[in-house]
Amino acid sequence: MSLQKNKIKMALAKGRVANKTIGRLKEIGYVFPDYSKESRKLIFTDTTDTLEFFLVKSPDVGTYVEKGAADIGIVGRDVLLEHPADVYELLNLKIGQCRMCVAGFKDTQIQYNRKLTVGTKYPHIAKNYFTQIDQPVDLITINGSVELGPILGLCDCIVDIVESGNTLRENGLVVLRSILDISSRLIVNHVSLKTKREQIDPIVEKFKELAF
Amino acid sequence: MLTTYTIEGFENIQYQGFQALSQIEHNLTNLYTGYGYHQVAIPTFETYDSFIGNDAISANELFKFISRKGRVLALKPDATLSVARMAAINHHDPNEIIKLFYQTNIYRHFSSPGDVRKEITQMGVEFFGDNSPECDGEVISLAIQSLKANGVDDVQIDLGHVGFINCLLDELTISKTDRAELFELIENKNIGDIQEFLSSRHYDPKISDIILELPMLYGDPTDVFARMTKLCINQKMQDVVKNLSALFEHLRSVGLDQYVTFDLGFTSSMNYYTDLIFKVYAGNWGAPIIDGGRYNKLSQQFGIDRPACGFAVNLLSLMDYLEEHDLIHVESPKHIVLLYRESEKKGVFDIASRLRAQGCMTEVFVINSLPTAMIERLQVQRLYQDADFYVFERDGVFKWEASSLNPVTAIESVAVASESE
């Protein structure tokens, strides 16, 4: 739970977010020479010796930062909404932008007052959304290849993130409703922001370049 | 086994931890008593209505029970309300100065997923009947000293004021749910979502701009004051700045300003706070150890209009911090085990009493098998690892040393001598 004083530790979500983020970090002056996708190292330090990062599964980023094992973290808004963490969501980094959507066959109707079966990796977000629009639903949690759901008749529609829409198109599905915009967020531990200001402020300032 | 006999969120405090905990309690009791605070004990249950009536806490977070008479009770989720009630019952003059402190457990189903502890051991102080910056100053000083008295040097206190944001939002027509949502976004410094929230509502753009500034209104006091002053759009907001700077002046003159930073983006987890709120951090520990603030309206619920200010220390969290930083130095008393033959009973019991009077932890066991076997069996047990063993036979007294029994002559002096080793 306690943090070491010198370097700022950053938790990065493995996969989509990390791939995009590490490239963009170079633009603002953070170069990680030892990092490559094949590397077996767990922690990478940048050339200015002020920032180090480690890769974790996306839902764990919030946990690491909330508990103070990492000072800051970069993770998609979808993950934060699905797995809420008690952290400061300081910046919207505009990396990995996409949308959370309801998708299904073109002729699928979201009908008022008829129960809809929804397959999703994001049960929390889906439930909130359908509660907001007063649509009764049965939620089925699926862990991958969500598009299969409507095709095999498991569910009427899906809630998932849509980036280019290619996967949907190739499977004959379309976006029915857009729920919210997703992008990566810079999150900061509550205490680190206050007690490590001298180290964190400059990093946040640099990240602002990615935000606007 | 564990899954059957433990309830998630409730912890056993083992004997090692308990000593540390009572050490902390002892230090805090001395500190608070030294400042004229009187200790009180508060009941485990409160009526459900007293928490729900004033929106102090979400109904989902309460542990609820029905009494035999049909009243709905709650395991108390917070101590301040109970202490305010006690003060109201026992002291009827609203201007009376009442300083109380307590040590108690509170119970909550925390909504935050990370928080697993549902039973929190707290020690706290409440100062009733004074609304001055000096009163705030005393409470803040006690909060800082609560950590210092336990050996924590790296203390930081973050001050906020719920009045600033409330007086700003008073300028708007805003629904209760929107207000709660906005508060949460500001509390999380979630600037991206605040922007989105504001763009979907039609508030005065001038006020929207100020709302966007609030989350960033933290850091060095002088700097924050300068920025706050620029953001004031009504008299009440200016009063908040005045109020806070008076407090900061006071803290500066008593030499506590070095510990203080500001954060006006604090909304309040407990809705009864009306003015100042603060959190105290130890080193880089991931969560605040002390929470507190001023609640000038809470006593009205009990029929007395009485300002008050106080805080609570999360004792287990403080204990974890101290443990991790090796700041717990508990002196255990010397542990002596006397094994005796039936014939030696009377003498051994006398010696044991004398050793206890000298402050030694002394236990006696009758010899019912081979003494060496008995000692070896005890020695591997966790609670006996640091004990000295003596055997009282008809033909003399033996001390267990280097895995054998060696005769010793004077029992009492042996015990005393080994104590001074």
Image (cartoon, coloured by chain):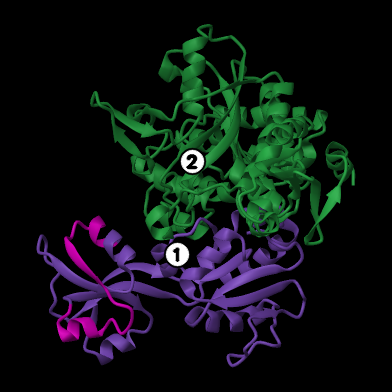
Q: How crowded is mark 1: few (under 14 residues within 10 Å), some or many (20 or more)?
A: many
Q: Which chain carries label 1?
A: A
- Tell me which residue sits at (41%, 63%) in the image: A81
Write the start and end of the magenta stretch as one range. A129-154
The purple-coloured chain is labelled: A
Q: Quadrant of residue B56?
A: top left
- Which residue is at 68% across, 38% downward? B343
The foreground one among B413 and B73 is B413
Q: Is residue B37 visible?
A: yes
Image x and y of residue B402, in percent: 82, 61
Picture quarter with the C terminus of chain A: bottom right
Query: Label 1 is placed on what type of residue?
Result: Leu
Whether tag 1 and tag 2 are in contact, CB under 8 A, the answer is no
Do the dots labelled 1 and 2 sit on one chain?
no
Q: Distance between the residues labelled 1 and 2?
A: 20 Å
Please name whichever residue, B114 or A116, is drawn nearer the observer in this view of the structure: B114
Image-based side of B188 in relation to B341, left or right: left
Which residue has dot 2 on it?
B269
- Is residue B416 positioned above or below B48 on the image? below
Which residue corresponds to the image point at 76% horizontal and 39% vertical from the top-left?
B148
Taking the magenta stretch, the answer to whether it contains residue B335 is no
Residue that label 1 marks: A80
Give me the chain that's green: B
Residue B299's place in the image compared with B248, above or below, is above
Q: Is residue A140 magenta?
A: yes
Q: Residue furthest left?
A: A114
Residue A68 spot, x, y in % from top left: 61, 60
**Residue type highlighted by circle 2:** Ser
For this rendering, which residue is in front, B377 or B302? B377
Secondary structure, mark 2, is loop
Chain letter for mark 2: B
